[in-house]
Amino acid sequence: MEFTESYKQTGPCCFSPNSRFIAVAVDYRLVIRDTLSFKVVQLFSCLDKISYIEWAVDSEYILCGLYKRPMIQAWSLTQPEWTCKIDEGPAGISYARWSPDSRHILTTSDFQLRLTVWSLVNTACVHVQWPKHGSKGVSFTQDGKFAAICTRRDCKDYVNLLSCHSWEIMGVFAVDTLDLADIEWSPDDSAIVIWDSPLEYKVLIYSPDGRCLFKYQAYESGLGVKSVSWSPCGQFLAVGSYDQMLRVLNHLTWKTFAEFTHLSTVRGPCCAALFKEVDEPLQLDMSELCLSDDFIQNKNDASEGHFGVRYEVMELPVTLPFQKPPADKPNPKQGIGLMSWSNDSQYICTRNDSMPTILWIWDIRHLEIAAILVQKYPIRAVAWDPTCARLVLCTGSSHLYMWTPSGAYCVNIPLPQFTITDLKWNSDGSCLLLKDKESFCCAAVPVLPESSEYSSDE
């Protein structure tokens, strides 16, 4: 892997959808860099510090959320002189997002008073009263033709279906939730999944015309759903719960066909490899010992904690580090708080929040555990390569960790004092964006050889 030098950032950073540019927030400035040369191609000055940025789907426009104002500013890469400013006045702005056509911006006011659709073409706007959430509760179909927006009135949750062409309400139906948590269209646009707050275990599948296709409830007592995710192929729906289990439903009968348990003790027989991160001290060749200044400097560096890490395959049985959450505090750190599907829908990785240093990788095709990664520090972020079954993760250390079906390995970041707190792939899987607290860098990732994309049948 090849790494760029580090560049300053004070907020969000992200690739454009076409992978040609990187947008970086530096205080009140929006810096647009070329992905290949890293040269600055555009520099926009906002009216306040940038809290949030989002590219339009066509990569031509980009919006900046100035939530301290509160205000939204949008910019065009092809027309640098073009400007757009959205200000809701006393209503405020808590969140903003692009529509699929890249020509409308949806903003949610403070206290969820209304959601407004702003047109960049004719300056028209459409209002939807009482949106349920600020940053959640809105989902678009894959073809970009319809939007599902959750609202709440008279102590009841509703779903509003809007046309993304005219922004007229095509239909409204009530949903059987006590306190709706979020909503998501299926990848094939044939169904809508809605789940309730953690206080009520309820996952509801609706058709676009408002018919309830299935109601799923794994158990009644205790905290319920923590995370929900469709597989990219649309055939599976993964539901992570506070009982530390991952359940997978199929799209034909909506029945559960797999339940994966995250146990603190792993015993055999187990076909999965268990990789543990261990320190690897620097090896000094004593045959050519030389007491030069360079040697003394290297020795000092080594004594200050500069060491490598590697994965060690552990033998079963193994007891994994487990943290029991306190019973007297709200929002306990337990249950499946992180899950992510591979692009081919064969694998899904999960993190049980009561075991924050453990990453579980499940093989959906064979309904078994594929690998377990045991890290030294809690897992901050994970991301699948959009082109193949390759997973990268970070833990806030100076190392990058990767897993493929052929094994796992650690990569040391050759930048001083650089710790990875977040990471993102570009859309073609050729480059990784790595974020530190006040800087970022990019890494060119080599293409996997054919031999490393084998299935477990081989």
Image (cartoon, helix red, strand yellow):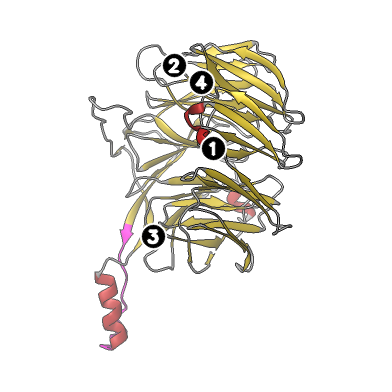
Q: Which mark is residue 449?
A: none
Q: Provide the secondary structure element on which disc 1 rests.
A: helix
Q: Earlier in the sequence, mark 1 or mark 4?
A: 1
Q: Are marks 3 and 4 in contact (CB under 8 Å)?
A: no
Quadrant into which the C terminus falls: top right
How crowded is the residue under tag 2: few (<14 C-alpha within 10 Å), some, or many (20+)? many
Q: CA distance from mark 2 to mark 1?
A: 38 Å
Amino acid type shown at disc 4: Trp
Residue 276 x, y percent position in the rendering: 35, 49
Alpha carbon of mark 1 to alpha carbon of mark 3: how far?
A: 44 Å
- Residue depicted at 44% across the width and 39% down the height: 272
Q: Which mark is residue 195?
A: 4
| Residue 445 pos. (x, y %) | 57, 59
Badge nearest the viewer, 1 or 4: 1
* Tag 1–tag 3 contact (CB < 8 Å): no
Magenta-colored stretch includes residue 322: no
**Magenta highlight range:** 279-292
Q: Which residue is mark 1?
A: 89
| Comes first in the chain, label 3 or label 4 | 4
For label 3, the residue is 398
Q: Amino acid at mark 3?
A: Ser
